[in-house]
Amino acid sequence: MASGAYYAMMNVVSRHVLADTILTLRMMICFYYGLTAFACVFYFRRTLFLSARDFFFRGLSPFLTGSLSRLFYRGESQYLLDSYCLNNIFCSEPLMKDTQTRFEETAMKELLKKIDEQQKKINEMRPLTSETVTSLKDYYKIGLTWSSNAMEGNTLTESETKIVIEDGLTIGGKPLRDHLEAYGHGEAFEEMMALTQKRKITEDDILQIHHLFYRKIDVENAGFYRKSRVFISGSHYPPPGPDKIPDLMKGMIAVIEKSRDTEHPVLTAAKAHLDFVFIHPFVDGNGRVARLIMNLFLLQEGYNIALIPPVLRADYISSLEAAHENDEVFLTLICRCVYETQKDYLRMINS
């Protein structure tokens, strides 16, 4: 009897031990797979994020027009570059920079090809009716004024910019200078449009554009090159001294005219923007005049206006700084903005 009871008790104990062992194994297996899944998510977190971000923006892009497309725009080249760099995560910094440079060159060539395809579609729609041309001019006048001023810290919204320029009203609580910048840029825009009738940019044209933009802010310096040294906050590259500005401006204009028939117009326009910013010929308003010069050249060559959305301000500023050593990132950014503005233009015309 005692022996039977002993074996019965051991049988019960064995079953409990076996059940506990199986439970423990199950828990270990679940922990293993959970840890593996976590490791995969952690390791590929950037890939998952980029995929989700890419799906979101690309999925929405056909439905975003006007201000919304400029607000949500983030270039495809940056998505691809982020994904591309995942494969080089353990590379040295010089190799990463070289990889990025080669990628930007490839991205820029692809963008220029897309730009040419879009431009062909735009040219096929011409000529437009006079009413459509006027409407587009008003649209880009507000869009360029708002975006260009916002890049420099102007607090007016796009709707408020329209009210200031078209209705001549002031916005309560907004600085007087913000109103003057909007009004002045509107006048400079009209001058830029008038200059599109000729296929040439002169030094006097640039001085007049700056005069119209800046005259209500500082009449003494409006349309005149600066007479003192200036320093740009956040930049490691100080602009040239005032004594060098006249010769540098003449050289810049000569390069622009020489490149008209030898280089892609978008690249020439972007480089003109870059050279002008590096010279920094005026006491203020250099960024806005640079973007007007860039768009003047594009318009003279048959392209439409390119808007740089304020959401890209950080990328724009960092690419300008980096362009002192390598201009590929900046040129790619401008190409992308030209392409996105072309898409916006075609959406408006087709709708």
Image (tube, grey):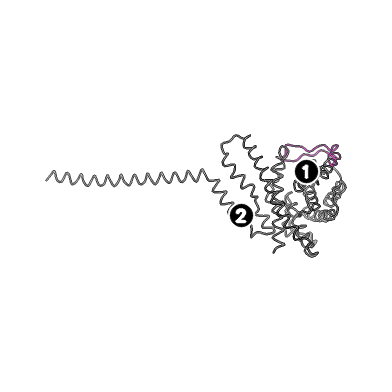
Q: Residue at x 62, y 44 (%)?
A: 81
Rendered-image quadrant of the C terminus = bottom right
Secondary structure character of the magenta stretch overall: loop
Q: Position of residue 350 (x, y in %)?
A: 70, 63
Q: Quadrant of residue 97?
A: top right
Depth order, front residue of 208/107: 107
- The kind of residue on which mark 1 rests is Val
Say which residue label 1 marks. 277
Residue at image mark 2: 58
User: Could you tell me how far apart the alpha carbons at marks 1 and 2 are, in whole angstroms?
Assistant: 32 Å
- The correct choice, above or below, for 161 with respect to 18 in the image is below
What residue range appears in magenta?
Answer: 226-250
Q: Is residue 241 magenta?
A: yes
Determine the image quadrant of residue 156: bottom right
Residue 167, image quadrant: bottom right
Q: Position of residue 95 (x, y in %)?
A: 62, 35
Residue 296 in the image: state x and y as whole percent. Answer: 80, 51
